[in-house]
Image (cartoon, rainbow, N blue to C red):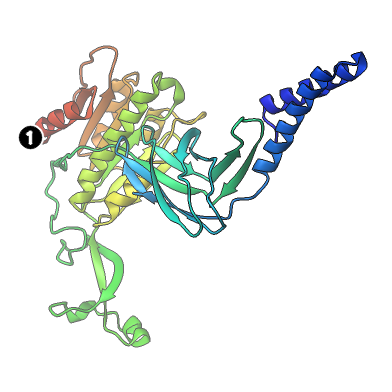
Amino acid sequence: MLTPLGWGTAAAGVALYGTGWWLGYPEPAMLALAGLLAVAGAVVWTLPRPKLEIRREISPLKVERGEPAAGVLHVTNRGRGIRGGLTGLDTAGSTPVSVDIPRLRAKGTRTVTYRLPTGRRGEIPVGPLRLVRADPLNLARRVREFGRPETLLVRPKTVQLGLLPSGRAYHLEGPTSDKSPAGTTTFHALREYVIGDEMRHIHWKSSARTGTLMVRQLVDASLPTTTLVIEAQPEAWADQDDFELAVDAAASVAVGACQANFPVRILAGGGPVADTRGGPDDAEAVLDHLTRVMPAAGAQPVLDVVRRVRPGGSLVVVTSGRSDLGRIATVRGRFDRVVVLRVRPESEAVAPPGVHLVDFGDLETLANAWQYLGRRR
């Protein structure tokens, strides 16, 4: 298709040729003819379809916000001769990314690497890749798409935080222990028998069906749950960066609990985000779920969400600082510990009795305050 310059050249050529013919001057007609021939040559130049085989990789597919991620193109020329004049244009979300396509001889293969933007958290669609072939005068160009879109997962940024002590004597053998106090264990999953397992835990029906001894894996239902509630009303977050920091803080708290193999429950104004039972893969699952959390129109106030949270364990509320601490404190009797994390509050506040208050402006400040909080009972 013609570019704006090409359309202008063609229109000017037609007008100039008509004027020269009408007035009987050959010079303008010859100049117009040269312009029209240039436009026709540009169309012919861009007409051939490049016979390219393009395979894209994203490395890595999951990345922490702000960490580098790259698109890798493996380009093979399946046609003849040298393909030049090609420019690649990829997209990462709404951000265009320019890709330099090298000249390729017949059957030649080149690898092109380019950086993808990771400044914003979320599921970032990458592609499809568009190849633009233009003539040297930029009178015409043709755009063709190659490859399928892929998804880059930009997850929250985290800092190492420990598990808060609950203040109660819980059984700490871990979520997969079968030595929990009487009446606190519940079925979690089936696994293959290993030497040392108690025979009373063998699930005979599954063993007969599979031909392998299968054992019931039990969890300690008394393990303290860390419940996180994230303020998700758009009007509560005047700055998008503040909300990103809030999600980073929630992710840091959740990952710390997951790494200790304790259950984590996360809610936002739009509803449940994640609910884990404690296990080695929970941290990855929590980060994936938090990647999709965004302020949502119609999200419920954080106080309404807190009131519906199941009691027990630790409650951590992440807010912008506009929430009523006194009303949040009304639920402190339902939890072993209540912590309110305020992101860059406009003014200082006094923590109500039974509520631990942490104001922070970055993850490093949060980590220092959290360490002090963990020493308090």
Amino acid type assigned to the residue bearing label 1 in the image: Arg
Left or right, 219 with respect to 61, comes to left
Q: Is residue 69 left or right of residue 81?
A: left
| Residue identified by numbered label 1 | 375
**105 above or below 21?**
below
Which residue shows up at 26% across the image and 50% down it?
263
Q: Is residue 243 above or below residue 135?
A: above
Please tell me which residue is depicted at 34% across the width and 35% down the height of the picture.
Answer: 229
How far from the left and from the top, in percent, is residue 189? 31, 68
Viewed as shown, does residue 205 lie left or right of 297? left
Does any portion of residue 273 appear in the rendered image?
no
Q: Is residue 37 above or below residue 126?
A: above
Q: Position of residue 293 (x, y in %)?
A: 41, 37
Name the image quarter holding the N terminus: top right
Residue 193 image position (x, y, % from top left) = 22, 79
The single residue placed furthest to the left in the displayed view is 375
- Nearer to us in this view, 114 or 294: 114
